[in-house]
Image (tube, rainbow, N blue to C red):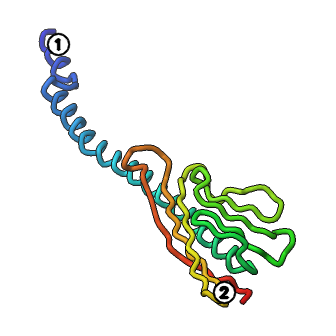
Amino acid sequence: MKNNSNKLLNNQKGFTFIELILYVSIFVMMLVTIIPFSWDMILSSRKSAVQQEVNSQARYIAERLKYEVRNATGVSAFFPTMIILNTSNPATNPTWIIGGGGGQVLVRQGTGSFVPLNSGNTYTNLEFTNYSSSDYKTKNIQFILTVTSKFGSGNQNNASTSISSDAEIRSN
């Protein structure tokens, strides 16, 4: 009978305290290496998304500004942050482009309302320069556009881009 109870004790399987400590320490070491790597991946993904949105909005605004200037017939009024363009289409005449209206680039065609070209997630700064010739045979408008994210103060949330371009009124 005593022999049978020894066999039962010897056949029982389980973890010893040393094995448990060893397995837990291996698991903790794996977590310590995996968690910072995963966190860096999440943050870099967020930063990439913010930069992509800023670049996309800057490209859209720049192309829209060039389109409006190229399709105009003349300049009615010119200021460093605002330009009023004349167009041949009565529905879009005059076309107002305002930069810096609360961080928005605003466009109004004809008697319509002002429409923002960028989302509320970005802040823009827009400056116009008139490089038209003195005889107005060449009507060239330069603009410098800066788009910055408004996602917060964290470094991973900051993105900014600047575009400098120009367009010539084609009705010469």
Marks 2 and 1, the one that precedes in the sequence: 1
- Look at the numbered discs 2 and 1 and tell me whether their residues touch, using CB distance below 8 Å: no
State the residue at coordinates (17%, 14%): 4
Location of residue 79 (image quadrant): bottom right
Percent x, y for residue 158? 42, 52
Percent x, y for residue 66? 63, 75
- Name the mark on residue 136: 2
Percent x, y for residue 149? 49, 53
State the residue at coordinates (24%, 36%): 27
**Quadrant of the drawing holding the N terminus:** top left
- Residue ranking furthest to the top: 1
Q: Examine the rendered structure and indicate whether residue 42 appears above or below residue 163.
A: above
| 164 on left or right of 98 | left
| 88 on left or right of 49 | right
Location of residue 47 (image quadrant): bottom left
Q: Which residue is mark 1?
A: 5
Amino acid identity at mark 1: Ser
Amino acid identity at mark 2: Tyr
Count of marks, rendered view: 2
- The foreground one among 115 and 13 is 115
**Quadrant of the drawing holding the C terminus:** bottom right
Say what secondary structure mark 2 lies in.
Answer: loop
- The foreground one among 2 and 13 is 13
- The foreground one among 81 and 102 is 81
Say what secondary structure mark 1 lies in.
Answer: helix
State the residue at coordinates (45%, 44%): 152
Percent x, y for residue 68? 70, 73
Nearer the camera: disc 2 or disc 1:
2
Alpha carbons under labels 2 and 1: distance apart: 110 Å
